[in-house]
Image: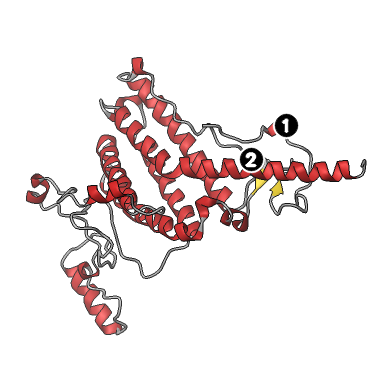
Amino acid sequence: MATTSLPVDSRPNTSKSGTSQSSIAFGQGGNNVPLPPVLNAQPLPSGNIHNPSTVYQHIQDMSSKRISTLHYLREAHEGRVYWFNTLLFSKTDLARMPYFESRKLARRATNYLILGLSLPSILDLNASHPLDYLRALNALLLEFESYQQIHSPDGPSSSSLSRARIPQMFKRAATHAAAGKGRRTSSAADIGLPMSTSDPADLKSMVNNAASTGSTAISFPTSEQELLPGEEYTHLLTPSLPFDPDFFETFATLCDVLIDCYTRIIGLLPSPAMCAPGVGEMFAKADSRLRKIIVQGIVKEFEEASRSGAKAELAGVNRVVLGGLV
């Protein structure tokens, strides 16, 4: 995948405000923001896949690159950086991209919110061992991929719906049930907080009752109305939201949570001695899924928009320059 549409050293020296033909601001030298690293995944060398030092260095490098990329994507969505020192996109400009179509944006924001709500428990409950943490993260991302296929912003396909109708396709293992690790529900009944109540005395009583039972799970009101028969998840929270979340705020927050995920990975691997067998493989799978979920679609849209915007800017400059000669 290309990392930029227009080489930085070949950009024309135009003004920050752009031409009259476009509201997109063009890159200028005063905004020296570090560019993110190459977004393509760097596979772990096959010959050194079992070498703890090589695995350790690979994880450290890729985690640092992903953190930089997520920072950059968040700032690009907020209109604070020029996309690879070429164009500055405002929210109005982003709204013109097919990826940010208002009809699809609400569903995409909901999906990102669901992922963001589900990640903190993975961070908290699996913070002692890197392999357990990466396994839980992979399981969550796999469930999120399945959820996104069924509840896609573009609408569910017939194949995803047929897979969703398979009875108990996300059925938990019997060992989990025996151990009491049931599905992470999102019901308000878990904490006793109905959405309709407004009596402070009732709320205080319900909170006290929940505290006395020793419940520590994070719960959110839900009716599970959007889940299809047999659609069940172990790690993924699926609350029913009273309104559509704001996409840009949700995306920025999700980037922060994912940055915490990669930071936790770095913290769990302070030395090559912690890279047990399987850690490199689990990290590669989780990183690949995160890149597919978050990075690829967004980067493609920004590349296409920056290419079109650069062409429009250059066409405007040509009209101004050639207009005085004709």
Amino acid at the residue labelled 2? Arg
Which secondary structure, mark 2? helix
Disc 2 packing (10 Å; few <14; some 14–19; many ≥20): some
Residue 235 in sight in this render: no
CA–CA distance in space, label 2 to label 1: 13 Å
Residue 25 in sight in this render: yes
Q: Position of residue 307 (x, y in %)?
A: 64, 40
Amino acid at the residue labelled 1? Ser
Disc 1 packing (10 Å; few <14; some 14–19; many ≥20): few
Q: Residue at x 48, y 31 (%)?
A: 40
Q: Which residue is under mark 1?
A: 10
Q: As rendered, which of 320 and 124 lies closer to the eye?
A: 320
Q: Residue at x 25, y 63 (%)?
A: 224
Q: Is residue 39 above or below residue 250?
A: above
Q: Is residue 136 above or below residue 43?
A: below
Q: As rendered, which of 264 and 283 lies closer to the eye?
A: 283
Please state the total of marks drawn on the protein image. Answer: 2
Residue 260 vs residue 176: left or right? right
Which of labels 2 and 1 is toward the front? 2
Image marks 2 and 1: residues in contact by CB distance under 8 Å: no
Q: Position of residue 238 (x, y in %)?
A: 29, 58
Q: Which mark is residue 260?
A: none
Q: Is residue 185 above or below residue 174?
A: below
- Quadrant of residue 272 within the rendered picture: top left
Q: Position of residue 102 (x, y in %)?
A: 50, 60
First in sequence: mark 2 vs mark 1: 1
Q: Position of residue 308 (x, y in %)?
A: 65, 43
Identify the image quadrant of the C terminus. top right
Residue 155 vs residue 177: left or right? right
Q: Which residue is under mark 2?
A: 307
